[in-house]
Every structure is written in structure tokens, then in C-alpha cells.
Amino acid sequence: MLKAVPSIAAVPADAWDACAGTDNPFVRHAFLSALEDSRSACGEEGWLPRHLVLEDPQGSVLACAPLYVKSHSYGEYVFDWSWANAYSQAGGRYYPKLQCAVPFTPVTGPRLLVRPDAPDPAGLREALVGGMVNLAERAGCSSVHVTFPTEAEAGAMESMGLLRRMGVQYHWENPGYASFDDFLETLSSRKRKDIRKERARAQASGVRLETLTGDAVTPRHWDAFYRFYVATSDRKWGNPYLTREFFDLLGQRMGDAVVLVMGFEDDRPVCGALNLRGSDTLYGRNWGSLGDYRYLHFEACYYRALDFAIEHGLTRVEAGAQGEHKIKRGYMPRPTWSAHWIADAGLRKAVERYLGQERAVMQAEIEDLATLAPYKKTDDSPPDSA
């Protein structure tokens, strides 16, 4: 039986997590419940939960998917504003729409969550996608959008008739470095010197950086980090998505995944970078500061993340959306994906034509950006493109 539930709390945590697995922290029940319980993702904010749950005849959860009815396109990082505007100008109503995603989180991960021991996993994923389309049709939604799925999921949904879209992010890969200096040795001489200068300038700033995990992150740290988050949101975006309570719940429910880099002037917190740890990847999520601390952003967000990944044997650091400046610091362009179902045939045809053109441009851009790689040109260099 396939059903849509009005909150993540309607699904037992162990049943959801049996489908979500442990590799990616953002699809864990704890993360999604922290978003909902803190009122960060709720109907009043334009994220009305309608999670899909597929049960066997005995009521055991076989598969599930995080799903929301959206009344806008904020907090998604796969931009469809132009589609909405075009449809509106043609007399259509683009909102509400359905969004299969982790709110405010541009991180690739599974979206069609299937219990590993469930029979016919491909059929269950197809049933989830079919359920999304059916729900959209019954609820009068214009479209379904699955954002930041895995490449395999995106390909499977394309074969089901959804439109596939390509994006780009910047990721760092660890082939087994023993130290940060070991990583630096793979770079060209000039890039190696540039990074050493940046780190030296950050260290000379007078701000002391600490990397905190687990129980070492206290409410005092969350108080400070929320101030940084709001201050930076005000400067850049104008509206912080996450509430103060979210960070408390995050620490309480999944503190094991939190990696918080905090900067102090004497004992006063002045900046911070929040990361979450998966089974093999460190995910950079939010940066905030109380002022303009030159070079500290690079140190706290990028280089400390690499330090942590190397020390703990993680194979990848994903530093979030956007930012070609990451390339010269070792983060290389990698494709991201989304899949889209659109009810109106005219809009679908126009979007399909646009996506075909966009993908060719995006692929060329990724290949062009890869030529800016800071690595030495040897057979042992990290691959330039995925």
C-alpha cells in the first residue's frame, strides 16, 4: 500500500532509516524531523510535508521518499523560476508543485529510499515515482521535481518518462592522502604556494579556529553559530531558512554527524562553518560570521574540511552549491542531477527543449572548468571530470 503522510513523525524512525541507510545524513529521519519539528520546513513556510510511504500487506515499510507540496521555489537550489514565470504568463498556475528533496540542502543523495532486503527494488522505486505523479494529479499540482538524486536514480527516472536536468558542484576527492601537505604535493607549485599563503594569513588574523564534534558542541556554540548564520543570511540572501531550534535539535538528534569549525577572538565566537559527516563524505553546509574576516572563509570552510577528511579517512568533501573559486583550492566540477514531471503538455515540451540545450552547455562548462585544475599534470592526478 502506498500512502502520503503529513509529517515525518508519522513514520517510525527505525522504519524510515531502514530504507534511508546510513551513508547520507540528510535523508535520516533525525535530520528531516529536526527540520519539521523546528518549523523550518512546514506548511507556513511553503514546505508542506507529504512524504510517500510504501508498505507491505503486514504494514512493514518497504520504501519511502521525502516529499513536500511547495507554494514557491525558495530553498531548492535547482532553479525553475523561469518555468514558473513562463507558465504564469501563458495563463497557467505553476504553484502548488511537488518537491521530492531535502529542504534547503543542495546535496546529492538517495531520494527513492528502498529497504535493502525488499523484493523488486526497481519496481518499488517506480511505484514511488508513480505515486508522486498520481498525487500531483489528484492535488492539482503542476509538476513534480526530484532534486539532487543520485545519478542512477536520475537515469532510472528518465527511463520512466521524467525530464532529466544537469547541474554542477565542486567536490574534493581523497585518494588516500596521509596529510594536508601530502595533498599539496599533488598541486602545481604556484597553487601550492597560494594555498600556503592563504592558510598563513588566516592563522595570522588573530582568530583561533577549533573543530568541534559530538558532545563538544554545546548550546553556547549553537547560539553563536545561529547569530553568524542570520547575519550572513541578512547580508547575502535576506531571509534565513533555518530557525534557532533547528540547530538544537540537530545537535541532540544527530550530534555524531556534526563537525563544527568555530572561530574565536580571545573567547568570543566570531565565525563558524557547519559540516555534517556521512559514511565516507564530509558535507559543508553553512558559513557565517559577524564581520568580514578575510581568508577565514577559505580556511574554515575548505581547508579545515580537508584536514578533517584526511585525518578521518573520508574519501570526499562536498563544499555546497556554486563557487568556481573552489577549483584552485582542489575542488573539482562534478555533475549534479534532477528529474521533472510536468502535467501541461505545452510547458513540458518547452522545458524539454530547454533542458536539452542547457545540458550541452553545462557539459561543455564542466569540461572547460576542469582545465583550471590546480593539480600537476601527471597520470596520478585526480580525474578532471566525472
Image (spheres, rainbow, N blue to C red):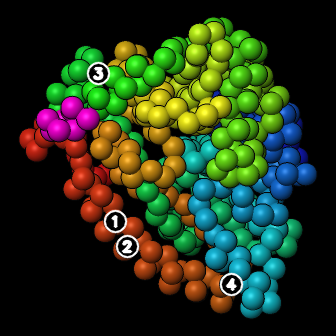
Measuring 61% from the left and 34% from the top, which residue is drawn there?
291
Separation of residues labelled 4 and 2 (CA atoms): 21 Å
Q: Secondary structure at mark 1?
A: helix
Q: Which residue is mark 2?
A: 361
Q: Are marks 1 and 2 in contact (CB under 8 Å)?
A: yes
Circle 1 crowding by C-alpha within 10 Å: few under 14, some 14–19, many from 20:
few
Q: Earlier in the sequence, mark 4 or mark 2?
A: 4
Q: Residue furthest right?
A: 44
Which disc number belongs to residue 159?
none
What's under tag 1, amino acid-wise? Glu
Q: Is residue 360 above or below residue 41?
A: below
Q: Position of residue 379 (x, y in %)?
A: 9, 41
Q: Which residue is mark 4?
A: 86
Depth check, front residue: 101 or 1: 101
Circle 2 crowding by C-alpha within 10 Å: few under 14, some 14–19, many from 20:
few
Q: Which residue is mark 1?
A: 365
Report whether residue 106 is seen: yes
Q: Is residue 256 above or below residue 112?
A: above
Depth check, front residue: 48 or 285: 285
Q: Secondary structure at mark 2?
A: helix
Q: Which residue is mark 3?
A: 180
Q: Is residue 256 above or below residue 147?
A: above
Q: Earlier in the sequence, mark 4 or mark 3?
A: 4
What's under tag 2, amino acid-wise? Val
Q: Position of residue 305 (x, y in %)?
A: 44, 27
Circle 4 crowding by C-alpha within 10 Å: few under 14, some 14–19, many from 20:
some
